Every structure is written in C-alpha cells, then in structure tokens.
Image (tube, rainbow, N blue to C red):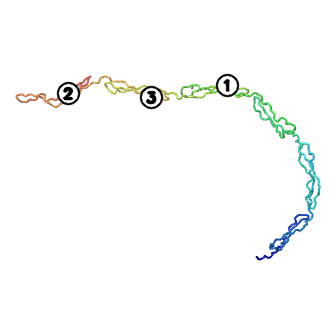
Amino acid sequence: MDKQCPVDCEVGDWTVWGGCSVTCGYGKQTRSRGEKVIAQYDGKICPDLDQETDCDRGPCPVDCWTSPWGIYSACTKTCGDGKQTRTRTILRKATDSGTVCPALSETVDCRARDCPTDCVIKEWSEWSKCTKSCGTGTKSRQREITTKPAFGGKACPISENMEVCNGQACPVDCVVGQYGAWSECSRSCGQGGRRVRKRSEVTKALNGGSECPELDEMESCTLGACPIHCVVGPFGDWDNCDVTCGGGTTRRTRRIITNRQHQGDACPDLVDSASCNTQTCPINCNVGTWSKWEPEYQATINGDSMNGRLIRRRDVLISPSNGGVRCPRC
C-alpha cells in the first residue's frame, strides 16, 4: 500500500480586532482566523487560531455612594396633616462622569392624629307653612349642617325647630242629610203642579262655617195632560119611518161638540133609533093568471053536441085582510 504524503495546515488571514472587553479601565480584545486546510498524515499542525491583546478604555466613572437613610424627624404638626424628614450623607463623591449623588433628604406627609372638627351649621330657614289653618297645627324650620363634628370636635346644635300654630277653633260647616222622596204632585193632571222633597240638618254651622243651604227643594211636576171628555149636542128630530106599517125604524142624530182626548170619557152613541109604524100592514088580494077559455058546460041534445058559453077562471092566491084591496070579481 502506498504511503500518503503529509498535508500541512494552512490558515487564513486574521480578522480585525474585536471590541475591548470593558468600557473603561484595562481589558482584553481578541481576533481570530480560520483553517483553510486541515493538517493530515503528520503534516504541520495549525498555529493558534485566536489571539488576545490588552486594551485601555481610560479611567472608569466613580459613582456617588451615600449612607443609609436616617430615621424620620418628628411630625411638624401634633394633629392633622404635617411633614417629617429623614437624611443621609455622602460616603464617596462621583468622579469621571460617575452617577451623581441622589437627594440627601426626603420629606413625607404625616398625621399624628386627626384634629377635632367642630360642627358647622347654616342659619335657620324660613318657617314652613302651618300644617293646619285652624285647630292647632305645627310649623317647622331647619338649618343645614355643612360640616359634621369629628374626632372630639364641638357637637352640632339642634337642626330642626317646631312650634304650635293656628290654635283658633276651626269653622264647622253645616252638614245636611240626603233628600227624602218627592211628595206627590199637587195636581193630578195638567200643568202648574208642584212637588217638594226635604232634608234635615245633620251638623250646625259653627265658628263662621258655611251656613246650611235650603232644606226644602221644590220643582214643577205634571202627571200628564188632563183627560178631556167627549161632549155631544142634543139629538135632532126623528127621521121619517122607513116603512109605513109592519114595524119600521126611525132615527135621530146628534153631533160631537168636543172630541175625547187624553183618555177622557168616550162619546156616547151619536145615533138613536126607535120602532115606528108597528101596526099590521093591509094585505091586498092577489090572484093568479087567467086560465084558457073553455065552455062553461057541454050537452048532447038529440045526438048533437051543444056548448054553453065560454068562460075562463083564475085562482085567488092571497086573500085580502086588514083592509087590503078586495079581490076583483072577475
């Protein structure tokens, strides 16, 4: 087997120096290079691939150092809102643009206790209207509390006051009862009637109260129009009898002078009749018709037929009576 030739390491160029490891004072900065060819077969190994050097950024800033805060001073007020302060000292001053020292004193609000607050109240309002116009009422007035007492402050005086008013006796108005029923109308019909209803006094008027109204009330009334009775005149003369015999009727009439109205009495009969000519009527003879002419008789003499005179007859159908016309002889 053939032996391989050694391959030496080859490196690239250095990079630029990196930044200093500190922002102030002495620090380090580095640069590096990479392997272009890796050493093989016992070739030369690569030199250092990283390189470090010192760097100087100038003096570092020195920050201010202070002591811890002291205790707060006593509150400036024994009650209510006050102030109290605490302080600290500089242990090291700032240099080379170091952080400057903070405030060396600090003041805060304090309250040892709440101060007493006295009541503050406004002036009295006007009196209210009396609750009654008579018979003893009350009226009141108020005043508004603007600040309530606190922490042992002065208490508020009364904020509401009340007095008696209008103690005079109240007027008592008359009180009347309900009306009773209406009386009957003074007229049973027609116009001009009157009827009355009454009521009684329940409570008398006192102390200037309203007097009683009229206790009686009257009004017109009518039970409808009065009846108007029929009025007729006297009968006139009798008419002629309608027959001369055998019982007929004769009449007489009268006229209405006032017609009936409003359920007045009805009119009596306006026609009156009576019997007349009640005597029996004469009965005249009534005969029938003539018969044919016929021989009065027939005879046979010596074999010859002989006729008498010719005659005809008629029968009496109704015999005359009561002075009626006698039957004719022939």
- Residue kind at label 2, given as amino acid type: Asp
The answer for how far apart the CA atoms under marks 3 and 2 are is 58 Å
Tell me the SS state at disc 3: strand
Residue 224 or residue 56, whichever sits in front: 56
Residue 111: percent from the left, percent from the top? 89, 44
The answer to whether residue 311 is left or right of residue 188 is left
Write the residue at 95% across / 55% down: 91
The answer to whether residue 312 is left or right of residue 135 is left
Q: Residues within 10 Å of mark 3 (few under 14, many from 20)?
A: some
Tell me the SS state at disc 1: strand
The answer to whether residue 97 is left or right of residue 166 is right
- Residue kind at label 3, given as amino acid type: Ile
Q: Mark 1 or 2, which is nearer the eye?
A: 1
**First in sequence: mark 3 vs mark 2:** 3
Write the residue at 32% across / 27% down: 243
Query: Label 3 belongs to which residue?
Result: 256
Residue 282 or residue 48, whichever sits in front: 48
Give the quadrant of the C terminus. Answer: top left
Write the residue at 68% across / 27% down: 175
- Residue kind at label 1, given as amino acid type: Val
Q: Where on the picture, by quarter, is residue 16?
A: bottom right
Rendered image: mark on residue 49:
none
Query: Label 1 belongs to which residue?
Result: 202
Tell me the SS state at disc 2: loop
Above or below 266: residue 128? below
The answer for how far apart the CA atoms under marks 1 and 2 are is 112 Å
Q: Residues within 10 Å of mark 1 (few under 14, many from 20)?
A: few
